[in-house]
Amino acid sequence: MTQMRREILEIPSAVDRLLSQGETAIQRAARQARDLNSSFLVSVARGSSDHACTYLKYASELLLGRPMASVGPSVASVYGAKLNANGAICVSVSQSGESPDIVTMTEALRESGAMTVAITNNSASRLAEVADATLPIHAGPELSVAATKTFVTSLVAGLWFLAEIKRDTDVLAALKSLPTHLENANTCDWSAPLDAITGQSVFTLGRGTSWAISNEAALKFKETCLIHAESYSSAEVFHGPVSIVEQDFPVIAFAAADAAEDSLATTADQLVGKGATVFATTDKVTSATTLPFVRTDHWLTDPIATIVSFYGMVDAIAKKRGINPDAPRHLNKVTKTV
């Protein structure tokens, strides 16, 4: 068993630990955010953490009705420009909390008048020091280079924060029941794509919060399997990218039980008609192959279970290709970008 696989199996207990130990920090930050009553949010992150922020962007806009935009860390760290974020809520996500560009931008946004919130696995990090509020994700040590349990706990911490701001009892209840669903997600049999994903290219698709999961899946294909994977919104794949689809081209489509599920299923079936081999986490497809999936107690938490099932599959693909997913070439666990 790889270290990555062990950490995937730890995800339910890591989420349970966050739910047990994170309440005080998250409720305190949510109270501060409610008092601020900001009309918009911004995010600061890179890599898997930026995919977590894409998920939180959709969650903010769908749950709170407040736009959330990603800002480029280099705007402050390289260009030295100042942004006017007075009155905004800034959510910075970094498992290590030590990347200089993330820290610099967070500090600059705080100085401009934003409320800064750090979501990190290191509450003693520089990022935590410069933020107004820190939300520790309580994932425990993550030794594999590829982020898995820190990605999932970042999603949970961020969604919990937003749900507390709104006092949304349905989402809060769904979060409390999430560990059991994630245990079930870890048992889903995603062996079907193993024989289909044999080349050097794959598409991943999603829409809304599931597009964030698609982005994370594409990154994991690249860093653990050395496969060139591209993520697209199911609304955009026919705006050019579909031209490279040929016979048996592999596609994985991520869906939740939300308002985008039907349209994503239609896109998945249309790609089958163009020769692609398509797998989808929905039973609404007619031509694509349905992958086993777990639905949670809320459509906003469905994508969290889906990425857990995917992680187990991508670990298996890496091993099948003779690659150690714990130590991808050219990569380190902590990337410090200026």
Image (cartoon, rainbow, N blue to C red):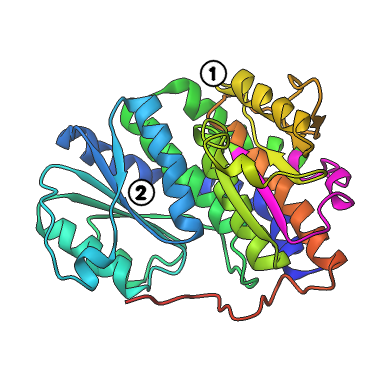
Residue 138 in the image, given as x and y percentages of width and height: 51, 57
Residue 200 in the image, given as x and y percentages of width and height: 74, 61
Q: Is residue 201 left or right of residue 125?
A: right
Within 10 Å of disc 2 (Cα), the crowding (few <14, some 14-19, many 20+) is some
Instruction: Please say if 201 is above or below 158.
Output: below
Q: Which residue is mark 1?
A: 259
Q: Is residue 138 left or right of residue 185?
A: left
Residue 102 in the image, given as x and y percentages of width and height: 32, 66
**SS at badge 1:** loop
Q: Which residue is mark 2?
A: 25
**Observer-nearest of 91 and 235:** 235
Q: Residue at x 23, y 73 (%)?
A: 78
Q: Is residue 111 left or right of residue 271?
A: left
Q: Amino acid at mark 1?
A: Ala
Q: Amino acid at mark 2?
A: Ala
Q: Is residue 73 left or right of residue 280?
A: left
Magenta stretch, residue numbers: 185-205
Whether residue 130 is visible = no
Residue 77 in the image, given as x and y percentages of width and height: 23, 72
Within 10 Å of disc 1 (Cα), the crowding (few <14, some 14-19, many 20+) is few
